[in-house]
Each structure stands twice: as structure tokens, then as C-alpha cells.
Image: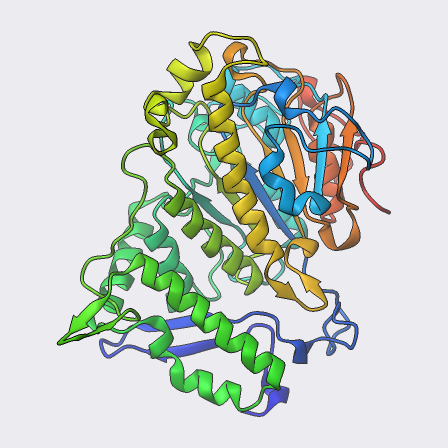
Amino acid sequence: MPMKSYSRRRVLRGLLATGGAVAIPLPIFDCLLNNNGNAFAATGLPLPRRFVSWFFGNGILPPRWVPTATGNTWDLSEQLAPLVNVKDYLTVISGLARKVGGGAHPGGAAGAVTGSQEGSGGAQKPSIDQIAVDALAGNTPFKSLEVGVTNATPNGTPLTLHSVSFRGPNQVLYPEFDPKAVFTRIFSMSSVGTPSTAAGAGTAAAAANAAAMQKLQAVKRSVCDTVLADAKDLEATLGAQDKMRLEAHLDGIRSLEGRLMPATTTGASTTTCTKPATPTLGPDANSEAPPAVNTLMADLTTMALACGLTNVATFTFSLPAAHVYYRHLGANMNDDFHNNICHADAGDATGQPRVHTGVLYAMRCLAEFAEKMKGLTEGADNLLTNALVYVTSCTAWGKVHGTDDWPVLMLGKAAGRLKGNQHFRYPGENLSRALLTAANIVGSPLTEIGKSEGLTSSPLPGIQIA
């Protein structure tokens, strides 16, 4: 295949013995870029910007979350300490207040991602990730990707307790909590070129995922092995750097697949790159938000962003008011984090040591995701440089359903629109202003966001680089 026929949308394709088809998306190769490594040579267009909405339930301890100094000479707080390796990419926004009403957690989630109250159809306005879709999606196969680590439920009926992604009223995009289903969806030929719908939201999608997985399992072959012939054809057209990148990319997918599928043993030898009858790691079945599921979802989301499958994702670490049990963090954490730790543990906002432990764990999981993005080379820089990760929760101090000092972080540099390594404080300002700021940073032309008390037409000053 001559190099001139290669495009950004190129995938490695292969057919299974059962007739099923798989496709492996590819990273951005150097041969596609200009000499500066910051734009596509053929079109002059810059590398794509990406947006991720990263959500965790049950809030924070504000005095242990908010850094003491502002500007660019500040130190990480106790609860932000896990982000030390991505501090240069971190923008902390503190002091914001949720202005919209509604139920404590469902209203808080709606306010934090839409600037409006929750309603019978979920949220009254589109969420920030779907605003980013309109600015960034382009012709990507998936308009957006919605994944989650734990489906620990708050046992409530409001839809804003079960998702934080909305195209609008009655248009809920539920997260997919099964890493195997996400893996299959990415590599299923039926997914390539098909716009995203609510992952895991319907029986038809689940049946399609199951059928695709059965085809993969039936021939005991990995997706990497299935496309080897196509990979060799492509490799012959690549330079030395891009050949190494292709090999590393396929090795990474093999590693990811190996963590999802157990090895198949034949005689004395073991092959890890095979499709067995029963996958090994499914969704969180014990409401624990286990580290292994977070790692897999971080890998899958990073791959989807880096390979041009989507430019927008929602990563739900835990749902609003999640009744999650962080048993793996210690014997004293084998308790309902929402009911018996956040709300019932004694102590003021500087205390509550079990709450502190849970928030630190969430931030370690966020750091893992951000560090994976930082570690993935893209042109002259890395994926995190070209991304904006918007981080928030469903409350401030969880014990009292606090509405002041709402947690908001922005990770990444949004292709030069964020400086990073800064702390901005806006006491009492409308939380929706952070949403409008994020929307403008990713290129949305919106001049206002929110509704009723949450409505704003003013982005936060000083954050976006013109």
C-alpha cells in the first residue's frame, strides 16, 4: 500500500474464521504531520483537541482539597497530592458555588455538568461533554464514549443519579461499566464509522456486543493476530519511528486484551494473545470501584481518544451519591461510603479520615488516567497537552451536601488554551461559569450556559489563553 493512500481514518482490518470482522484503530503517525509535529501535513489542520468529563461522586473535604496559595506559585493540597506527576497540566478552580436548586446529589450532579436542575427526563440542558461533542466530534466513528468504573447505585429514581451525560431532556447517555463490552465495541467492525449511542443503555447494544465477543472467542485468536497481515503491509510503508510506534501500539493492545482474557494453554506452552471461552474481568460486581477496572477503563478511553475513535468521553469513576464500598483500601473502609462514611462519620470538614481516604483513592485513579494521557506521545507533544479533562462531583462537602467551594479541576493544556500549573479562586461565583469556560476552551461558540439561577453568560476570567 503506497503511503499516499494512508489517512488518519486508516485501521488495521482482519476477518475471523467465523466470518466476523475486527478492526484495530491506529495512533497518529509522524509521517502524517508537518515538520513541527503540531499539524497534519496534508491539510494544515492542527492535531485534534479532546475533551473528557471525569466525574466522581460524594464530594470532598474542602479545607483539605483547596490549595492555600493561588496563581502559579502554589502547592498541591492534601487531597490533590496524588496529581503531583501532572501538576504542570493542572488548573484548580476553587470557591465556586452551585446556584441551581434541586435534590442534594441529583441536583448537584445536574448543576455541575449542565448548569441546570434535574428534571423528569434527566437534566434540563445538555451536559458539558455533549456541548463538547458539537465542537469537537467531527467525523469520528463515535461522537462520544461513556464509560464507568462502578455502577454502585444510589437507589434513587432521578436519572441524574445514574448518568452525568445528557444530550438534553429525555436523552440520557448511560455509562458502560463492563470493560469487555467496551473492548469489543472498539474492535467490532460494526462500530467503525458508526456514531455513538448510549453505551450499555439498551438490550440491542448488549446483544450486539455479546455476538461480537462470541465470534472473537470462537476462533481462539486475538484481535492483534487477526490483523497481522494488514499490519505487515502497513509497516512496509512506514519510517523507523512510526514502525516502532506501530509495534508498541499493537503490544499495548495485546497487553490490554491479555488482562481481559485468560491465557489459552496448549500442551506445555501458554499463549496470552488468544480468545478463550470465558473473559476474566467483567464489571464491578461488588460496588467497590476496583483498581483493575479503573486501569482498564483508563487504558480503553485513552486508546479511543488517541486513535481517533472519538474526541469526547465521559469517565464516571463513581455515580452521584454512590453507595460504594472501598474495601480494598482497608478493613475500616468496608462500609457504605455515602451513608455511613460521608454522612455519618463524626468530624468537621478538616476531619473525617475515612472520607479523606476515599477522596484520595478517587484522585489516585484520576491521576492514573491523566498520566496515561501524558505518557502517550502525539506529534511533538502528548495526548494530555491536546486535551481538556473537566473534573467535578455531585456536592462539595458531602456530609452536609455543601454547595460552596465546589470541586472543579481542569487537566491538560487544550492545545495551548490552558497554561496549567495554576490555582484560581472565585469565592461565591456561579459554578456554571466554569462550564462556559470549558465550553469556550474546546471551541464551542456558546455565549451562555445553564438555566434559571444557574444561567450565566460570563466565563471565568484569566483561565483561557486567548
In this view, which residue lies farthest toward the left?
267
- Judged left or right of residue 305, residue 269 is left
- At which x and y percent is residue 96? 71, 22
Residue at 61% x, 88% y: name it: 3
- Judged left or right of residue 278, residue 362 is right
Residue 127 visible in the picture: no
Which of the pair 171/317 is nearer the observer? Answer: 317
- At which x and y percent is residue 371? 58, 51
Residue at 41% x, 41% y: name it: 149
Residue at 72% x, 30% y: name it: 93
- At which x and y percent is residue 274? 27, 70
Which of the pair 365/386 is nearer the observer? Answer: 365
Considering only vertical position in the picture, is 429 above or below 224?
A: above
Residue at 71% x, 75% y: name it: 33
Residue 152 visible in the picture: yes
Render colour scheme: rainbow
The image quadrant that residue 331 belongs to is: top left
Considering only vertical position in the picture, is 119 above or below 449?
A: above
- Judged left or right of residue 235, residue 229 is left
Which of the pair 355/75 is nearer the observer? Answer: 75
The image quadrant that residue 237 belongs to is: bottom right
Considering only vertical position in the picture, is 260 above or below 200?
A: below
Considering only vertical position in the picture, is 361 above or below 37?
A: above
The tally of labels here is 0
The image quadrant that residue 34 belongs to is: bottom right
